[in-house]
Image: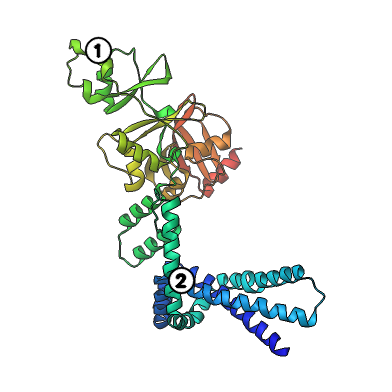
Amino acid sequence: MDIEIVKFTLFISLSFFCSGSETALFSLNHSSLEDIINKYPKRGAIINHLLSNPQKLLLSIIFVNIFANIFVTLTANSLFSHYFPTVPLAAQIIIITLFILIFGETTPKSIAISFNRKVSLTVAPLFYILSKILYPVIFLMSKVANFLVNINSYLFFRNEIEAKYYKSDEMIEVIQSSKSLGIIEEQESDILKNIIEFAETDIWKIMRPRDEIFSLSIDDNVKDIIKVIQEKKYSRIPVWKDDDENIIGILYAKEILHFKTNDEKLLSYKKYLREPIFIPETSSAEKILEMFKKTNNHLAIVIDEYGGIAGLITLEDILETILGDIVDKNDVVPLYHRYNHTMIEVDARMELTEFNEVFETDLKSNEAVTIGGYLLEKIKRIPKVSEIFMFNNLQFKVSGAQPHKIEKMMISKINKFHRKKSRNNT
């Protein structure tokens, strides 16, 4: 009966080996595999060869693992019959199953995921040889598996397209490596990363907020409208009726700018309004771009969960998230003007992270996204023009504000002498 104990130990070890090998090999990402190939060319080539045909590798591992688990069960049953004949069959099945789960699945997989490179380098040559020995069996299993997959795909997923893809973080890792090696330029790297992150981009980061939307009333004088369009140089303007929440159309400047101010045709300019497109703020940037392509529109009104106007988004806003800022002669001035290394004037809309990078500071906030929001978080109110505040060795002087928002601030770094002088004055 001692031979049965040896057989049981051998087969559970084989199951342990197969489960760990599967996890280690299939958990290698592309950068890890590339690193292995550079450091260990021969074994790296073997691993690369095995992973180039994952179905063949997986079937080889599964075949050996099932073989091992079957014999674990048979030898365990024999041991129970000899040493514990009174244990019920149901209890034997439960004990054997738990034993296989712990020592043949959970434990080896947990170990392998932590040491996937070392394990892969060790087991790859063995499975390379095994795949050659088991080739006839694996070939037959592969054909049967593909046949069943094709039947299921036809019956249940005929309208779906199977797509193989990398995870976004892995792709970004590859882009970073390519940039470091000089294969691609920094600008190309930024564009590729923006494309990968595009689908997950939040609308609120792209859209123009409601208080920055320039719109017209349907009752506005036409001559005044033409004058405003010429001054503002907007190509598309939302038009509202009765209330600025009630957007009834989008006016394209090109439709009326060619008319003369005394042209009678202007009296019927309302016919040039195009139907507005409304999108919920929960929409993804990817869906909005697809909508722009289908409808041939370049502007949409973003609405919040209550049906109110949350903001406005344009095709240019979408493209800038991918390509970066698009330079336009009508674009607004930069969000900051730096006078020297200790003084800067900023637009309150400037992002806090960008401000920290430009002004070499380390301001942090749990809620605020912009530098204006940071100051509001600190003082808990809308400040007046010329008010001065001091936080984190910085002096904030409000240089522009409206009753409902901050527009501009002059920010200066406070040196030690200035701080001492301020304390003495107090």
- Sequence-wise first label, 2 or 1: 2
Give the structural element (helix, strand or loop) at label 2.
helix
From the viewer's side, name the closer residue of 292 and 387. 292
Q: Classify mark 1: helix, strand or loop.
A: helix
Q: The disc labelled 2 sits on which kind of residue?
A: Met
For label 1, the residue is 268
Seen from the viewer's position, the closer of residues 155 and 224 is 155
**Amino acid tagged 1:** Ser
Q: Is residue 370 left or right of residue 229?
A: right
Residue 232 spot, x, y in % from top left: 29, 26
Identify the residue at the far bottom of this view. Answer: 2
Give me the disc on residue 141.
Answer: 2
Return the x and y of residue 7 as percentages of the image width and height.
65, 85
- Residue 338 to residue 408: above or below: below
Q: Is residue 242 visible?
A: yes
The answer to whether 36 is drawn above or below residue 227 in the figure is below
Quadrant position of the N terminus in the picture:
bottom right
Q: Quadrant of the C terminus?
A: top right
Tell me what residue is drawn at x 24 percent, y 36 percent.
Answer: 329
Q: Position of residue 217 (x, y in %)?
A: 35, 16
On screen, residue 257 versus residue 147, left or right, reads left
Residue 252 lies in quadrant: top left
Could you give the CA–CA distance between mark 2 and mark 1, rounded to whole angstroms?
A: 74 Å
Where residue 313 sits, quadrant-wise, is top left
> Pointer 2: residues within 10 angstroms few (<14), some, or many (20+)?
some
Residue 148 image point, x, y percent: 45, 61
Q: Residue at x 80, y 73 (%)?
A: 87
Which is in the foreground here, disc 2 or disc 1?
2
Q: Which mark is residue 353?
A: none
Q: Are marks 2 and 1 in contact (CB under 8 Å)?
A: no
